[in-house]
Image (cartoon, rainbow, N blue to C red):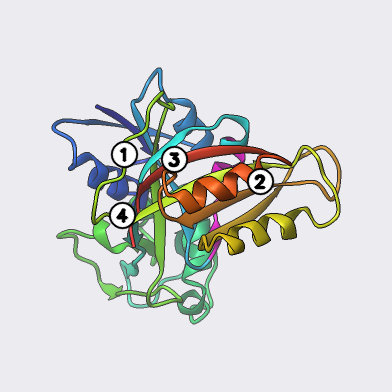
Amino acid sequence: MRIATLGPAGTFSELAACEFGRQLPNYTLAFYPALARVLKAVPQDADLAVVPIENIVEGMVSPVIDTFVKRPLEIVGELSIPVRFSLVANHQRPEKIYAQFVAQGQCSECLSRYDVPIMNTASNSEALQLLQQSREPAAAVVPEHCLGDLSFAHIEHDITDYAHNETRFVAVREPHAGRKAPQAGVHYKTSLLIIDDTDHPGLLVEHLQVFAAYRVNLTSLVSRPTGQKFGQYHFYLECEGHLEDSAIRAALTLIQLRNKVTVLGSYPSAG
């Protein structure tokens, strides 16, 4: 089983991909430099792609949602990875700090205590590498799982702004003709797209009223611009339950009378 994910090694994406890989009898991991490249690898160069879809602090990952609109893939699983960063330094008083730009945003409170330049890097791994190569007093923001047995002159653990920061990842594949029937005792989630091809006043309210009428609990709702003109949006939704649940089937039947609906998959919920 070939799994594609965002590289380089040492990312939270690698952690998530390895977690999915442990559920398989055998797998290989391939890193790609951008989310679009990761998703494009399926199915020719990878059987699965593991990508971040939501962060507790920063919300939905828009490039992933936009890719689903252009090329629907099947979501087959999800999991959440705790996001924990440490600040490590080769000196008690660093004169600069290396940090990947997303890590910088998630650790802004800690970094604000240091009146030194922040040097943005392409990845967390590069930040650690540049610190190790530096002959000047410097520090780096590094995922805690990358520290291993490394030693530093100064370490601050768990420097994220939010104590319970997590990123949710999904595993996707090329859509298959048939979907697995729901298993008893498993809590499912269903992801879908509502394509806005017949825009009219009250469109979103109508859809929400349908879900409410059938008591379908929505857990995520994101609007994304169609790219055609201002005011037109596609909608990405997640709801509790399996596509074969009668309430979800009935709700989608009504919604499909007005708009195109693309089901991205029903899969065991990480929650």
Q: Earlier in the sequence, mark 4 or mark 3?
A: 4
Q: Earlier in the sequence, mark 4 or mark 2?
A: 4
At horizontal 51% and vertical 54% (from top left) the residue drawn is 238
Does residue 238 appear anywhere in the picture? yes
User: Can you tell which quarter of the image residue 135 is in?
Assistant: bottom left
- Quickly name the residue at label 3: 265
Q: Amino acid at mark 3?
A: Gly
Closest to the camera, between mark 4 and mark 2, is: 2
Q: Amino acid at mark 4?
A: Gln
- Range shown magenta: 58-67
Above or below residue 133? Residue 85 is below
Above or below residue 246? Residue 179 is above
Dot 3, how many residues are within 10 Å of its Cα: few (below 14), some (14-19), or many (20+)? many
The alpha-carbon separation of the residues under discs 4 and 3 comes to 43 Å
Closest to the camera, between mark 4 and mark 3, is: 3
Asked whether 63 falls inside the magenta stretch, the response is yes
Does residue 100 appear anywhere in the picture? no
The alpha-carbon separation of the residues under discs 3 and 1 comes to 12 Å
The alpha-carbon separation of the residues under discs 1 and 4 comes to 51 Å
Dot 4, how many residues are within 10 Å of its Cα: few (below 14), some (14-19), or many (20+)? some
- Quickly name the residue at label 4: 132
